Amino acid sequence: MAERPVDLRSDTVTRPTAEMRQAMATAEVGDDVFGDDPTVIALEAEVAALFGHEAALFAPSGSMANQIALQLVVPRGGELLAGADAHVVSFELGAGAAISGISSRTWPSAGTGLDVAQIVTMIRPAGYPAAPTRAIAVEQTLGNGGVVGLETLRELRAAADDAGLLLHCDGARIWHAHVADGVPLATYGALFDTLSVCLSKGLGAPIGSLIIGSAARIAEARVIRKRLGGGMRQVGILAAAGSWALRHHIDRLADDHARAHRLAAALEPLGIVDAASVRTNLVLLDLGKATLDAPALTAAAAERGVLITPMHPRVARLVTHLDIDDAGTDKAIDVLGSLLSAR
């Protein structure tokens, strides 16, 4: 049997652990459309409590969770502000506009931070002819793995309150921010009107995200989820995997962060990454001065058993996760280092 490649394309490629599979196999289930799947109910209550909110709703994907949340905070014809590389506007196939009638504008990506003063200047009040700004969406962590600092988020919350806006957090990897900075999840939760969190990235569950908010908003979210085709039946089998992940896979994210930093530190002498900027499990390689561009590096690495993602012609991404151990990290360092130093 061929050796399994070292798959650094994303933390979505993880496989359920044996213990997680056992939890799924023995899960008590009901019919979630009828609201009586006990394992789903327990998971939703647990996640809502972790973030200090009243309720949560299980959804099959992060994109659906985000799009449901956006409908909760931006009425049709309203405007959303977000970062230029934000998943909700750049990697969900225009769903906010196509499905929900949401207009959006973006601020330039700012490395590992947010310029709150700049965001404030973008806010448009109600009144013809501009679409009024209704909400701001923030990623935690950012698309480059950076962690938005707590004081910056508090400043943004105050600015949103002053302008009468709602805040949504795309918290697909908020668990990583929690581990990296030690900020309690409930502290993050208190800063946002809605959040989406993912179970199938760093936490290693096979599927699932949750929308978090007030009881009234989550009741509305349940209707929107059904409208979008997200009503599921005996979904407790999947929720059980998420519950296992919450109890066993959050603290171990520190291992993923350490391996990502080791990758970056080993490749830093090649001038393609600043190891000090790697806070979580994402490593972006800037190949601007390298002979190989991102597609060429991706193809060459795959031939040697290391899978990475070309994000742009001159940017490649590496993501550590549950299925990457020290041996896999070492192999990735050897393969990528040899390919980039030999050119």
Image (tube, helix red, strand yellow):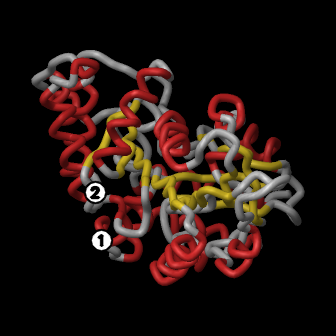
Residue visible at 73% across and 45% down in the picture: 103
Residue visible at 75% across and 75% down in the picture: 121
- For the residue marked with disc 1, what is the amino acid? Pro
59 is higher (above) or lower (below) than 151 = above
Query: Is the N terminus in the top left, top right, bottom left or bottom right quadrant?
Result: top left
121 is higher (above) or lower (below) than 132 = below
Residue ID for mark 1: 184
- For the residue marked with disc 2, what is the amino acid? His
| Residue 250 appears in the picture as rendered | yes
166 is higher (above) or lower (below) than 6 = below
Spot occupied by residue 92 in the image (x, y as percentages of width and height): 64, 37
Residue ID for mark 2: 53
3D distance between C-alphas at marks 2 and 1: 13 Å
Spot occupied by residue 71 in the image (x, y as percentages of width and height): 54, 40
Q: Which of 129 and 214 is in front in this view?
A: 129
**In the drawing, does residue 306 fall left or right of residue 222?**
right
Q: Nearer the viewer, residue 3 or 117?
A: 117
Q: Which of marks 2 and 1 is nearer the N terminus?
A: 2
Crowd rating for badge 1 (residues with CA inside 10 Å; few <14, some 14–19, many 20+): some
Q: In which quarter of the image is residue 307?
A: top right
Q: Nearer the viewer, residue 154 or 296?
A: 154
The disc at residue 330 is none
Crowd rating for badge 2 (residues with CA inside 10 Å; few <14, some 14–19, many 20+): many
